[in-house]
Image (spheres, rainbow, N blue to C red):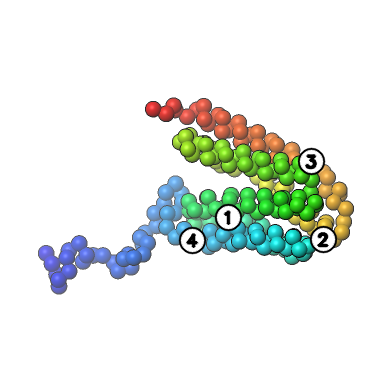
Amino acid sequence: MIIGGVPPSLQLVDKRTIGYYDASPRQVGGMSKRHSMNIPNSLTILRILLVPVIIGFMTYGSYGFALLTLLLAGLTDAVDGYLARKLNQRTRLGTLLDPLADKLLLTSSFISLAVLHLVPSWLVILVVSRDLMLLLGTVVAHVTSTPITVTPTFLGKGTTLFQLSYVLLTILLTWRGIDRSTITPLVVLMVGFTLASGFHYLYRGYRDANAAPPLS
């Protein structure tokens, strides 16, 4: 029955749902599919945008500003994760952008420091090679539809912590004109965690690949 010239299919449609997201939140695997551009994801994008700013400051020798910008980027990393959990705003976009932002921040910082001869080249090769190995493994798993475990581990979190601490302290010591050899113990810890986490992720990938059912 048509009332007032309006078809029944449209009589109960709330005008707020036309051209907008569904008014009821939908959860998929604990992550909301709507409002991907929320506050946590905006902070993550800000962190990515700060990467060239940090590189620029280091290139022109403004180590104090580079340090402050890097600290700001690190703060956004802590805040976006907290807000995503507190506000229940975890999204698929966020799970992709957050680790990407971290890798871009650390990798670009290490490469910039190496170009400026502030860190040894072998150390940068180690850090970048590990990240490339993980990226390649993820791509292969995606192409071959192989399920893999992508949850962070203690070794992985420790690696990120030590790498970020090393970059921060290297910039700080360079800025203040202090001998960088004073952080040699940190270098040892960072190298150990980087190697251990790399081999651990390799083992997990190999285990998951063997446990996956064969493709028909």
Q: Which residue is mark 3?
A: 188
| Residue found 41% across the figure and 51% down from its top | 27
Sequence-first tag of 3 and 4: 4
Q: Residue furthest left?
A: 1
Tell me the number on the disc at residue 175. 2
User: Of the residues tagged 4 and 2, which is closer to the observer?
Assistant: 2
Q: Quadrant of residue 43?
A: bottom right
Q: Is 7 on the left or on the right of 146, as rendered?
A: left
Q: How far from the left and from the top, in percent, is residue 162?
A: 73, 47
Image quarter for residue 171?
bottom right
- Residue 123 seen: yes
- Place of residue 28 in the rendered image (x, y in percent of width and height, measured from the top left): 42, 49
Of the image marks 4 and 2, the number of the one nearer the N terminus: 4
Q: Earlier in the sequence, mark 2 or mark 1?
A: 1
Mark 3 neighbour density, 10 Å: few (under 14) some (14–19) many (20 or more): few
Label 2 is placed on what type of residue?
A: Trp
Horizontally, is 102 left or right of 139 in the view?
A: right
Q: Residue at x 86, y 48 (%)?
A: 181
Is residue 76 visible in this depiction of the protein?
no
- Which residue is labeled 4 in the image? 37
Residue type at mark 4: give it: Met
Separation of marks 4 and 2 at Cα, in angstroms: 36 Å
Q: Helix or strand or loop: what does disc 4 sit on?
A: loop
Q: Quadrant of the N terminus?
A: bottom left
Could you tell me the amino acid type at mark 1?
A: Gly
